[in-house]
Image (cartoon, rainbow, N blue to C red):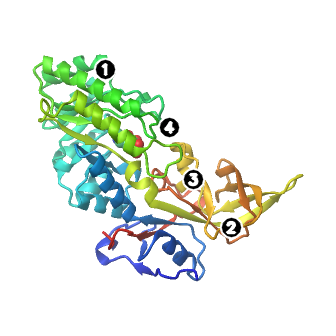
Amino acid sequence: PAGKGAQLLELPARFRDGDAGAAGAARYARGSASEALQAKVAQAGAEDAFFVADLGEVKRQFAQWTQLLPRVQPFFAVKCNPDRLVVKLLAQLGAGFDCASKGELEQVLGEGVAAERVIYAHPCKPASHLRYAAARGVELMTFDNGDELHKIRQLHPGAKAVLRILADDSSARCRLGLKFGAAPDAAPALLRLAVRLGVDVVGVSFHVGSGCQSEAAFGDAVERARRVFDSAAALGLRLTLLDVGGGFPGAGELGGLDFASLAAVLRAAIDRHFPPAAYAHVRVIAEPGRYFVASAFSLAVNVVARRRVEGAAPAFMYYVNDGVYGSFNCIVFDHQRPRPRLLSPRDAPLFASSVWGPTCDSIDCIMSDGQLPELQIGDWLVFDNMGAYTLCAASRFNGFNLSDLVYVDTEGALL
Ligand code: PLP
């Protein structure tokens, strides 16, 4: 029976102050993610879209990271999913944090994370945000141009600057190099400028692009970083930090890289270009975002309307209650292609089907060309792997609320 084994509970008080979860009224359930899905839809009057977030999945991803990349300390890229419990959990597990703004710094520091465990990993920072970092003792930060160095010298003279260089991101779903990263041959001049200004450059970072599809890009970027270490050494600078950025695949992502083989390539590249014997003084960190959270969140949406398409073969358009202006903004910004499954699967003929979000706009299309059994109004669809770059960029366009949130922890007690 629906809901058997899982009961929806109020979050413990220590998680409830402030805005816990999307709608600020998140619940949690004991049991599995699918039990939580069933429990939520079995509630009287249930029709709002909601996420089930499995913190246990984040724990498993963390454990896998520690096992396969023991030399690389992960700094979770908060932008990917600033969910309060995810941040709390990763803080407890010992992760560092990559923050991109004052708001993210406030959140992470507000969780009691020490400033030394934070990198302000945005190469182009607003002055007020930089001042805030200085006031709160966040020293580690990236830069990729001379103007930023002048700004850092003026507003945060105690900063430990990390030069972000361009990596080959040509295979990535989101090519960050179009916007950030110093060309490798510009690095020596930037290092000289830093020396002249008295800005303390401590390391090198790169980002192979989010949704990277090439293991080799990581190896190549590590080699580029090593060349910058050599240029720095020629200027008398002893760099101590290598930041290999983000771009690691989420578990369960269709067509993504395999994390284990990527980790093997990265381990080998780090060991080759930064052999531990000669580079024991170099600390290696990374800024994974989607890796930790993509597979931890599933989104359940309710069919609120449907339309039969006239034509030779039967086809259906379904309208559901979260869309491209909401959690499915990942289709536009992150180039994801979410695919639904039925919450209650059934053996039935399939029909050409499209799935649309709730707003009045026709760009609000979640899937244009799927095959689904005939659905009825009130049926539930589930989209898995919805934890990365979804809720964090959702809007309330057309007056629709953000989707609700239910937590589970399949690896023990909540947090
Ligand atoms: N670091 C920086 C500077 C980024 O801009 C991003 C994503 O945009 C990330 C890390 C996280 O990337 P990913 O989620 O692909 O690991």
Q: Residue 184 location, x and y as percent?
A: 31, 20
Which one is nearer the viewer's eye here, 372 or 23?
Answer: 372
Q: Residue 91 location, x and y as percent?
A: 25, 58
Which one is nearer the viewer's eye here, 264 or 5?
Answer: 264
The first of marks 4 and 2 along the sequence is 4
Badge 4: how crowded within 10 Å, few (<14), some, or many (20+)?
Answer: some
Residue 102 appearing in the image: no
Q: Amino acid at mark 4?
A: Arg
Whether label 1 touches label 4, CB < 8 Å? no
Q: Amino acid at mark 2?
A: Val
Q: Nearer the viewer, mark 4 or mark 2?
A: 4
Badge 3: how crowded within 10 Å, few (<14), some, or many (20+)?
Answer: many
Q: Which residue is mark 1?
A: 184
Mark 2 CB within 8 Å of ligand 1: no
Whether label 1 touches label 3, CB < 8 Å? no
Residue 325 shows which numbered tag? 3
The quadrant of the picture occupied by the N terminus is bottom right
The first of marks 2 and 3 along the sequence is 2
The first of marks 1 and 4 along the sequence is 4
Q: Amino acid at mark 1?
A: Pro
Q: Amino acid at mark 3?
A: Tyr
Q: Which residue is mark 2?
A: 304
In space, the residues marked 4 and 3 are separated at their CA atoms by: 20 Å
